Image (spheres, helix red, strand yellow):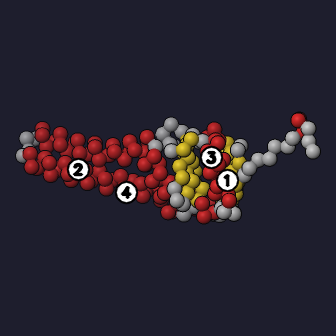
Amino acid sequence: MSTGGDQIQRTEQAAFVYGLTLADLQGVVRVRARRTAAGRAETLLTPLVITGLVVAFGLLRGLLPVVVVSSAVLGVGAGVLGVVRGRRGMARRLHAVWAPYGQCRTVVDDRGAATTGETMSYTADWKLFTHYAETPDLFVLVGGPRASCLAAVPKRGAEEPADVDRLRAILDRNLRGL
């Protein structure tokens, strides 16, 4: 029995224990590239710039149209290859940064997320992030105007199956979905 001012607020929380793998971080980079404006711009900009430069050079030099078109196709291919290699490199660099932290435990509630690893711990409130995306394997938290702040919570780390649904509900209350 409680009276008006004596009510204790219960905070719903979800707990996850995991080690971030290279595959997890490749998923994070993929989400950023596909679902954020900054990621889409980076994805499109490289092939377009390379193709534009190749076509401009060919036209200025007076090359035959078939050579210009062939060069443009090769430029698009080189640009796409550059984007793919860049994403793989970004995921490897992120993994190199996160690997020393080892096994992590993240507890998420309506105030934010607290993560404790083997060699570090940090707390982030929801002001740090603006959006989230859900993949079959991950929850990806995105923040900053250029999606520069990223965090990942692998679903496989849920301490109990209901934690995945609890985390989704917490994220829906505090962030916008991508």
Q: Give the mark, 3 or 4, whose residue is nearer the N terminus.
A: 4
Residue bearing mark 4: 85
Q: Secondary structure at mark 2?
A: helix
| Residue type for callout 4 | Arg
| Mark 1 or 2: the one toward you | 1
| Residue type for callout 1 | Arg
Residue found at x 15% / y 52%:
70
User: Which quadrant would residue 62 be assigned to in this image?
Assistant: top left
Percent coordinates x, y for residue 150 in the rendering? 55, 48
Give the number of callouts. Answer: 4
CA neighbours of label 4 inside 10 A, class few (<14), some (14 to 19), many (20+): few
Q: Secondary structure at mark 1?
A: helix
Q: Quick one: which residue is furthest to the front in this view?
A: 1
> For residue 166, which numbered disc appears in the image?
1
Q: Nearer the viewer, residue 126 or 117?
A: 126
Residue bearing mark 3: 171
CA neighbours of label 1 inside 10 A, class few (<14), some (14 to 19), many (20+): some
User: In the rendered view, would you say 155 is above or below 46?
Assistant: below
Percent coordinates x, y for residue 125 in the rendering? 67, 42
